[in-house]
Image (tube, rainbow, N blue to C red):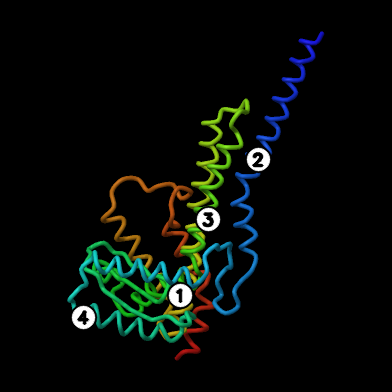
Amino acid sequence: MRARFEKSGEASARSLVMKISLFYFFSILLAPLLLFSIGCRSIDPQTGAVQRANLYSPEKEIALGLTEFRKIKSQKRVSSNATYTEQLKRVGDRLAKVMPLPGAEWEFVVFEDSSPNAFALPGGKVGIHTGLFSITKNDAGLAAVVGHEVAHVVARHSGQRLTNATLSTAAVLGANVALRGSDLNNNAATAAVAGAAFLNQQRFSRVQELEADRLGMLYMARAGYDPREAVRLWQRFAQWRQLNQSGPRAPGMLSTHPVDERRMADLQAALPEAMALYNQSQ
């Protein structure tokens, strides 16, 4: 009788451990998603950007941005193409007057790089690759790119991404700890959490890209650049990808960037607001 009672007690204890582990498992899995959802409920009235969870202060973001920009300039060759440099300065100076980034020490640099890419870092540091100018085509196209990249900074996307990555890592590590000693398959369960965290990160990035598209188009419109050129820019990007990228396109849910069709559709939807700003600037 005693042995049966002890076995029954052990079974109950294992069942309790499993229930507790499952509770922690799903709590840890959902925590980053819940925090992300809660952070999406307010809009910054000054910038128009969505406010999300961010463990980094603006001062910390700027310090990280300045450090990274110095590192990039030490590693990449600055272009000597006067035409590109003058165009970027002309467009950048005009946009800087309307982009809500107080205290920015603006620096616009063209880097020798054939890949059509660009970036902006906290503190007002903007880099454009020479390979991008064949796609931007004109001042308005370049304004769409610069506006998009600076919108990431205005909306504080870098700090939000670092925060989301920290939460996702904590979810994976926490699940691993919580599931030790349970009857669940630890490796499989931890892999499930890691997979969910990865998909959450990818979705988070796509949401930020679409937000930067919209804000960037509004900035270029305020600066007097025709916002319809932002749609044409992404049409040219889509054509460039068709010609230069081989292999099947990754499924949308696995990508850090929205598909071109989604971007162009969202920009088209935001055009009435942007055109109103553009007309006011004329």
Mark 3 residue crowding within 10 angstroms, few (<14) / some (14–19) / many (20+)? many
Query: What residue do we see at 26% from left, 55% from top?
Result: 244
Residue indicated by mark 2: 24
> Horizontally, is 279 left or right of 46 in the view?
left
Q: Mark 3 touching mark 4, by CB under 8 A?
A: no
Name the outermost residue toward the left: 80
Relative depth, front residue between 233 and 2:
2
Disc 3 is placed on an element classified as: helix
Residue 263 is situated, as x and y percent measured from the top left of the image, at 45, 63
In primary-sequence order, the first of circles 4 and 1 is 4
Instruction: Report how far apart the C-alphas of labels 1 and 3 lie in the structure.
Output: 26 Å
Q: Which amino acid lies under the numbered mark 3 shown in the image of this protein?
A: Asn
Between tags 1 and 3, which lies in front?
A: 3
Residue 241 is situated, as x and y percent measured from the top left of the image, at 31, 57
Between tags 4 and 1, which lies in front?
A: 4
Q: Which amino acid lies under the numbered mark 4 shown in the image of this protein?
A: Thr
Specify the quadrant of the image occupied by residue 2: top right
In primary-sequence order, the first of circles 1 and 3 is 3
Disc 1 is placed on an element classified as: helix
Disc 4 is placed on an element classified as: helix
Instruction: Report how far apart the C-alphas of labels 2 and 1 lie in the structure.
Output: 43 Å
Instruction: Report how far apart the C-alphas of labels 3 and 2 lie in the structure.
Output: 19 Å
| Circle number at residue 83 | 4
